[in-house]
Image (tube, rainbow, N blue to C red):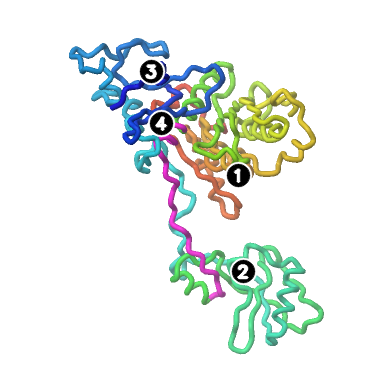
Amino acid sequence: MALALGLGSLFNHSESPNVSYHLSTETESIRYVTSRPIRQDEELYIFYGHKLWFHDADGGAAVNHVPDTDDGWGGLSGVGENEEHADDSTKEWSLLEGKTDDIIHIDDLPFTRIKLTPDDEEEDELEAIRTVDAWAVDITDSRQIASMLKWLRQAGLEDPSLSHLKRIRKNTESSSMLLAPVSLYPEAPPLPATTDLPAPYVVTVPKNAALTQTSLKLKTTMWPTVYAPRKKWEPEPWSKGKVRWAWEAMKTVVVEAKLAKQRGELPVVAYVPPAYDTGEKDLAQIHQPVIAHDTRQSKSHPLRHAAMNVVRAIADYRAASSAQDDPSPTEALDDSTPNSQVSGTSTTDSAATRNGSHYLLTSLTLFISHEPCIMCSMALLHSRVKEVFYLIPMDKTGGCGGVACVPRLEGVNHRYTIGRWIDGQGGISHDGIELDEAVDA
């Protein structure tokens, strides 16, 4: 136990604090850490627990009266203890007690992850191997192989869809060279006029690399295949401090969604906070939260989804970042607002050249009230978002596990983590911000 003295004793209590703490037994002190960016002149609140002998700073009455028996600490010994009949939000916060850096078990996280890699990709049976057709040519003179490989590069036939296959297959008295997929070249590619090679023919080859030794042996009987065992899926560990950071973000999303609904907008909100526990020199980061609402109704524009608006807001942030050290837009701009008004300064030519120098959402996390639609999910993929967390699934329109899962599609060049917040966890609920299931978010 520790007793807060000095500045620590000045924090008011709140059920939605912006400051957390943990006790240090080594230094016999209390360490206070802000759980989200603090605005200028904003009061600092801390959560004292559920046995309160004073009125809540949020305006509510005292939760409990002073204990009948004095515990020698004026009632402070009950701070942080769990109530036997606490509600779900109270129970949820019990997992955050302790040190900020403590890792939370994956089964106790307030969200579930959407898995992006299926379990049945091994293709360990011959009948399970997926195949494609490709053009090949036999080469009897091994001295022609080098010149043919050079010709392949010059002719632009090195298609990445065949990169998991070796170009040359050695036979008993000759070699065979893989040329191009039939799907791209329905007719046989014309060979160099300087060669006397036979006409190309079609072969059936494996569609994917070999993930296991068994699969490698089977696929090599068809054509020499690259062995590329998949790494075991190991999700990033989450600390108690990071879970509180995510909780604050998701709570902000729900509050803003309800306010948007009161204004007559669709209650869909996207929120990108500064990354948790990141270095100041990381140029991909932002230093103020960026929030955007769905404005399709007020703008009469079908593309003004919340996710699209937040991408655009961060684009404006990037464009203005060289004009001011720390621009801090908090809302997506209207169509009539030029970039020069993002932070009250004019956008210079250097800002314009810097915009687009890296992908917009690299290393950033998006929190959103509803599962993004397919259009927004693809926009997030192109923006290289790190991870997406949503509260309400959209089974008929969603692109992050609903009707489709965009980062799981074959051939995409980026994959981002997807998490679905468990309704009710941490007191965060979808009540009041539901959408018709046919409306895309």
Extreme-front residue of the structure: 27
- Label 2, secondary structure: give it: strand
Q: Which callout, 4 or 2, points at the residue further toward the start of the chain? A: 2
User: Which residue is found at the position 43% from the left and 57% from the top?
Assistant: 232
Q: Is residue 398 above or below residue 413?
A: above
> For mark 1, what is the residue?
384
Q: Which callout, 3 or 4, points at the residue further toward the start of the chain? A: 3
Q: Which callout, 1 or 2, points at the residue further toward the start of the chain? A: 2
Is residue 199 at all visible to an observer of this figure?
yes
User: Which residue is found at the position 55% from the left and 32% from the top?
Assistant: 273
Callout in the foreground (4, 2)? 4
Please state which amino acid type lies under the numbered disc 1.
Arg
Magenta-drawn segment: 222-245
> For mark 3, what is the residue?
9
Query: Magenta stretch: dominant SS?
Result: loop
Distance from disc 4 to disc 2, alpha carbons, whole Å, reads 47 Å
Could you tell me residue 189's position as x and y percent? 74, 71
Distance from disc 1 to disc 3, alpha carbons, whole Å, reads 43 Å
Q: Which callout, 4 or 1, points at the residue further toward the start of the chain? A: 1
> For mark 4, what is the residue?
423
Is residue 92 at all visible to an observer of this figure?
no
Tell me if label 4 and label 2 are in contact, CB under 8 Å.
no
